[in-house]
Each structure stands twice: as structure tokens, then as C-alpha cells.
Amino acid sequence: METQTVVLGNQKYEVADPIMFIGYVNQGKSPEAALTLVNEVLDAFEKIMDGMCMALTFWPPHKLEYVHPCPDGGTMRLLLEKLPPITP
């Protein structure tokens, strides 16, 4: 699977799955801080996700919802709340 280098602050990560990675980097962060990280991660993944429609919304207090519109008109939803930690 193709990976993308994501730089957050002075840390570099090789990431294959942006959604799992967002769950990892957002552990213990406020929604405001998490949203900033989400935007940075998604910016880094534009090449991989070219053509993929997505929306990110917060559910109080710390649930992040990823919504991916599917070709059949439905949506795929992932709540990023209890993801296992991944190794950067």
C-alpha cells in the first residue's frame, strides 16, 4: 500500500491509512486541536485521496466522524473514538 510522509510539528510519520492515523494523533486532544491536525493530515494525503469526497464533523465532546459519500448515494461512516494506537 502506498504511504505518504506526514509532518506534524517536528515529527515525521510514514502513513498508509489517514483515518487510522487521525485517530492516533488525536488521542487526548481537544476537538479544536484535533481539527487542526485533521486538516494537516488530510492536506498531506491529497495525492492519495484525489477524487475521494469526504467530510469531517465533530460530535461532542471528542468523537470525530468521517463521512465518505459512496457511489450508490449512501454514506460510509467511521467514528474515530476507540481506535487502537498505531506506531508512528
Image (cartoon, helix red, strand yellow):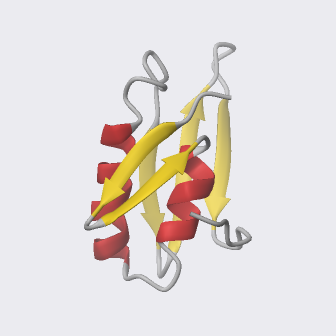
Which residue is the extreme one toward the bottom?
28
Q: Is residue 5 left or right of residue 77?
A: left
Against 41, is 59 above or below? below
Q: Is residue 53 left or right of residue 78?
A: left
Residue at horizontal 34 percent and vertical 40 percent from the top:
44
Residue at horizontal 49 percent and vertical 22 percent from the top:
52
Of residues 85 and 62, which is closer to you in this image?
85
Q: Looking at the picture, how far across and down is residue 19, in whole percent?
A: 58, 49
Of residues 48 and 51, which is closer to you in this image?
48
Q: How many discs mark residues in the rendered view?
A: 0
Q: Is residue 77 left or right of residue 69?
A: right
Quadrant (top left/top right/bottom left/bottom right) for the N terminus: top right
Residue at horizontal 71 percent and vertical 73 percent from the top:
82
Q: Looking at the picture, how far across and down is residue 64, in whole percent?
A: 51, 63
Against 69, is 22 above or below? below
Quadrant (top left/top right/bottom left/bottom right) for the C terminus: bottom right
Of residues 54 and 26, which is closer to you in this image?
26
Q: Looking at the picture, how far across and down is residue 41, in whole percent?
A: 38, 49
Q: Looking at the picture, how far across and down is residue 55, in whole percent?
A: 43, 41
Residue at horizontal 30 percent and vertical 51 percent from the top:
40
Place residue 83 in its image quadrant: bottom right
